[in-house]
């Protein structure tokens, strides 16, 4: 794959596409991977709040967990998770487990 | 502060900071960037100083920024922002600005604010530009590999203040940047920590609002995994302990009145603060501290709290 | 269409610059004082205070911030101006490179002043020459009228080429001396300077990232873009100058010649004082039977190679009169170095002397310049001569 020529690039090194780092999946960075055990999750939102990558997504719907009904669920977008483990460290019910990334 | 968001459920959901950037796993500044960009909303221009954030978020041809963004150099983010603000003002007057009420926000690290950037910050504050200046403080020149800055705390290990027999980490105390900013009599300045997101977000929005009156300033405490030497899952915990031990108090300077925010509002009483050791022992950059040195730091912290206490009486 | 009424004012070079900026519908001006440019920004402040100029003044706290502020303002889409000199230009130097690399159409006036140390407030081109390789379009004007006309032209050139432009002229000798300047009708100037569609600006409706980090896989292409843009700016400079001439009746070209049609010996130089004196010296030489002429470089960057070659085609020998010292260079005069390169690359081998003169506003005498012509006639050589210094 050859890179673009000088004449093909925007002038002044301007990057005209906002948010283009999305092309770069940082999944390969991690050695540990967070797994959310939904049955222990009380929807406190702290994992979503603190994730430095913003890669924990809020899903809306109807979720019955342990006899309680919630309207949200939290899921990790593993494309960008760097495995820092802040979510697991902050989770008040220890619902997130850091497991070794499969080789 | 004005309370725009009462609970976590009220916080904005749309991500305005793209993943895929090169910031370290567990970076405190990354948490800050996510929430800053969400809170200021899309109608803002960001001027960024050279530093960790700039370099890891704009690797050509990719950018993590969804906002119009400009980086020029290390020491001049406040001057660049002054130009942007003046341009928007004039272009609006001449009917040539089509984006409405666009805000101007500076994002700079402690290197680009305390030291090399102090002059242009002071000039911008003195000229009363309607700019929100956000300092993300990781307490050293992290981007170049952990060198001491005016913001580095005393006794902290950095590569230019190593620990040996002749020197024991940084020699001087951390500079009081909030004091300097407050001396410029700005309408609003506040400290915030990435562990207290609701507090931080309300302060960002309040500060942005007050740019109608003049320059506003936010000092955000952002722990650094490689620089402070701790495992990457502890960032929020350390940012929380910094506040709980009184090391980094949460307060606001609001139109000439200093107000401590929870939980710091209880910490004038030393017995209500957690022991400083709990904060220090988690970080490798303080691993060499002797009991005597810790006592010295505590004494200085007590003096600072006394001073803060007096300021609340203004 | 030529304008009908003539408004002629007695203005210093600096005031001529200020009037040109006023006529050009500038949006943002960064103001910081330094001798000898201060009266430009003072005049502009007066215009704004009187309501004659609708621009935002940013009273920055240093020249580094002055240039940084106009970079920010220009990036946001505003038409901007600032002025500096000597140590101020040096302090801003880091940003000069950035302004041209970010392709921002900034216009800056630089009444040239010698560099410290020792500190000197007087005129030579040490400061401008130290900025010659920063990617800016550089004009060197020789009269207050030319300063006025060139600043207006510079806005159109900068906004067409997407490169910043510097308009330099003699500090004190021109900035503070009064000459008659014919002012254009301001409405006509605005028509001559329509606001172009900028390739990129900071605007939330069309967000872009400016000033990223470029790794070795990318950096070179942007520098190449800059190099070619500056080369191509030559055509833009000539076109705009011709259009300006059609509309306002005055144009200057990129190189000005005096009595060069049949000259055997030439002095090549820049700036008002040197050019004026050289012309008087050429007249003196002519009276004494030496076929003397003068070439003035008006566009210094991008260098007008072919124009210089053509101007010097017929001469037997020439002298390059430089007013700056590039220490440690094979020849210390910056213009001499450029012309030597041109000659070498085009296979022209003629005796050419580098005269270093007027350093720190050391008085340049017409008699001394006349002696250059006799020297060229009697002892043509290729050497550097420091003229006017007590050795």
Image: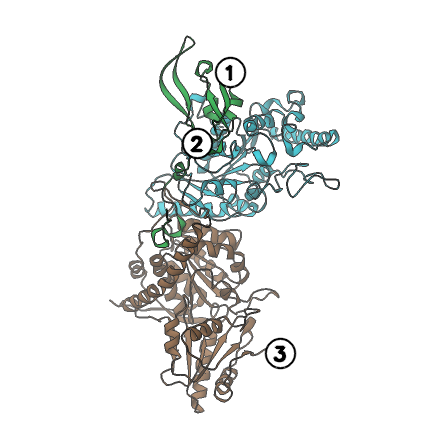
Chain colours: A green, B cyan, C brown
Q: Position of residue C326 (x, y in %)?
A: 54, 69
Task: Kindly report the distance in space between the C-alpha atoms of the residues bearing marks 2 and 1.
Answer: 24 Å
- Residue C191 percent coordinates (x, y): 28, 59
Asked if residue B312 lies left or right of residue C371, the reply is right
Question: Can residue C270 be spotted in the picture?
Answer: no
Between disc 2 and disc 1, the foreground one is 2
Q: CA distance from mark 3 to mark 2?
A: 71 Å
> In the image, are marks 3 and 1 on the same chain?
no
In the rendered image of this protein, does residue C25 appear above or below residue C242? Answer: above
Give the x, y percent position of residue B297: 69, 32
Q: Is residue C95 above or below residue B304?
A: below
Extreme-top residue of the structure: A67
Q: Secondary structure at mark 3?
A: loop
* Residue B14: x %, y % from top left: 38, 29
Between marks 3 and 1 in the image, the one whose residue lies nearer the viewer: 1
Which label belongs to residue A93? 1
């Amino acid at each position: 794959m050859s890179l673009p020529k000088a004449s093909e690039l925007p002038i002044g090194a301007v990057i005209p596409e906002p948010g283009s780092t999305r092309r770069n999946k940082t999944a390969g960075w991690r050695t540990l991977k967070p797994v959310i055990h939904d049955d222990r999750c009380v929807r406190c939102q702290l994992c979503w709040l603190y994730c430095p990558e913003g890669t924990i997504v809020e899903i809306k719907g109807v979720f019955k967990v342990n006899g309680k009904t919630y309207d949200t669920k939290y899921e990790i977008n593993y494309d960008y998770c760097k495995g820092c483990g802040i979510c697991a460290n902050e989770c008040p019910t220890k619902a997130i487990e850091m497991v070794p990334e499969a080789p | 502060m004005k309370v725009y968001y009462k609970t976590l459920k009220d916080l904005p959901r749309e991500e305005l900071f793209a993943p895929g950037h090169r910031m370290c796993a567990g970076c405190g500044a990354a948490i800050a960037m996510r929430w800053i960009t969400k809170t200021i909303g899309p109608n803002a221009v960001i001027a960024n100083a050279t530093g960790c954030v700039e370099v890891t978020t704009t690797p050509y041809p990719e950018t993590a920024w969804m906002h119009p963004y400009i980086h020029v150099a290390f020491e001049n983010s406040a001057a660049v922002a002054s130009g942007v603000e003046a341009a928007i003002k004039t272009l609006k007057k001449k009917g040539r600005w089509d984006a409405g009420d666009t805000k101007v926000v500076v994002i700079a690290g402690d290197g680009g604010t305390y030291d090399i950037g102090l002059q242009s910050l002071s000039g911008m504050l003195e000229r009363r530009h309607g700019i929100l200046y956000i300092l993300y403080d990781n307490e050293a020149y992290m981007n170049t590999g952990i060198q001491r800055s005016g913001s580095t705390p005393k006794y902290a290990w950095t590569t230019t203040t190593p620990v040996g027999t002749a020197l024991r980490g940084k020699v001087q105390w951390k500079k009081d940047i909030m004091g300097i900013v407050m001396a410029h009599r700005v309408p609003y300045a506040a400290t915030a920590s990435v562990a207290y997101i609701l507090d931080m977000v309300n302060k960002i929005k309040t500060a942005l609002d007050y740019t109608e009156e003049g320059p506003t300033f936010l000092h955000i405490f952002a722990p650094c995994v490689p620089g402070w030497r701790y495992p990457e899952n502890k960032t929020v915990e350390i940012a929380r302990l910094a506040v709980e031990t009184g090391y980094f108090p949460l307060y606001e300077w609001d139109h000439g009145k200093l107000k401590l925010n929870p939980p710091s509002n209880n910490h004038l009483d030393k017995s209500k603060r957690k022991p400083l050791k709990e904060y220090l022992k988690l970080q490798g950059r303080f691993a060499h501290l002797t009991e005597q040195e810790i006592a010295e730091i505590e004494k200085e912290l007590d003096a600072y709290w006394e001073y803060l206490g007096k300021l609340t009486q203004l | 269409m030529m304008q009908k009424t003539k408004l002629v004012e007695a203005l210093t070079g600096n005031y001529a610059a200020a009037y040109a900026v006023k006529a050009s519908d500038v949006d943002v001006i960064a103001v910081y004082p330094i001798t000898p440019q201060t009266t430009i920004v003072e005049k502009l402040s007066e215009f704004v205070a009187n309501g004659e100029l609708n621009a935002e003044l940013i009273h920055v706290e240093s020249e580094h911030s002055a240039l940084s502020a106009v970079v920010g303002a220009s990036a946001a889409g505003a038409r901007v101006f600032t002025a500096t000199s000597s140590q101020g230009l040096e302090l801003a130097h880091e940003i000069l490179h950035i302004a041209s690399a970010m392709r921002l159409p900034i216009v800056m006036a630089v009444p040239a002043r010698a560099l410290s140390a020792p500190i000197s407030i007087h005129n030579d081109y040490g400061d401008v020459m130290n900025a010659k390789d920063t990617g800016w379009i550089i004009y060197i004007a020789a009269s207050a009228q030319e300063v006025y006309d060139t600043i207006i032209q510079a806005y159109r050139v900068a906004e067409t080429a997407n490169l910043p432009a510097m308009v330099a002229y003699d500090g004190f000798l021109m900035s503070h001396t009064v000459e008659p300047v014919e002012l254009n009708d301001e409405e006509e100037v605005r028509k001559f300077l329509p606001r172009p569609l900028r390739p990129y600006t900071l605007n939330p409706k069309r967000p872009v990232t400016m000033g990223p980090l470029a790794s070795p896989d990318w950096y070179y292409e942007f520098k190449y873009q800059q190099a070619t843009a500056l080369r191509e700016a030559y055509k833009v400079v000539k076109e705009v100058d011709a259009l300006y001439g059609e509309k306002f009746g005055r144009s200057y070209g990129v190189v000005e010649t005096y009595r060069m049609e049949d000259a055997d010996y030439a002095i090549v130089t820049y700036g008002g004082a040197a050019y004026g004196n050289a012309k008087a010296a050429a007249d003196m030489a002519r009276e004494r039977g030496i076929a003397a002429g003068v070439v003035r470089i008006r566009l210094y960057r991008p260098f007008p190679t072919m124009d210089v070659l053509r101007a010097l085609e017929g001469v037997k020998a020439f002298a390059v009169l430089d007013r700056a010292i590039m220490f440690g260079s094979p020849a210390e005069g910056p213009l001499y170095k450029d012309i030597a390169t041109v000659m070498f690359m085009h296979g022209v081998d003629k005796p050419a002397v580098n005269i270093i003169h007027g350093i720190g506003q050391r008085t340049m005498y017409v008699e001394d310049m006349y002696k250059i012509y006799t020297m060229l006639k009697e002892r043509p050589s290729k050497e550097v001569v420091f003229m006017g210094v007590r050795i």
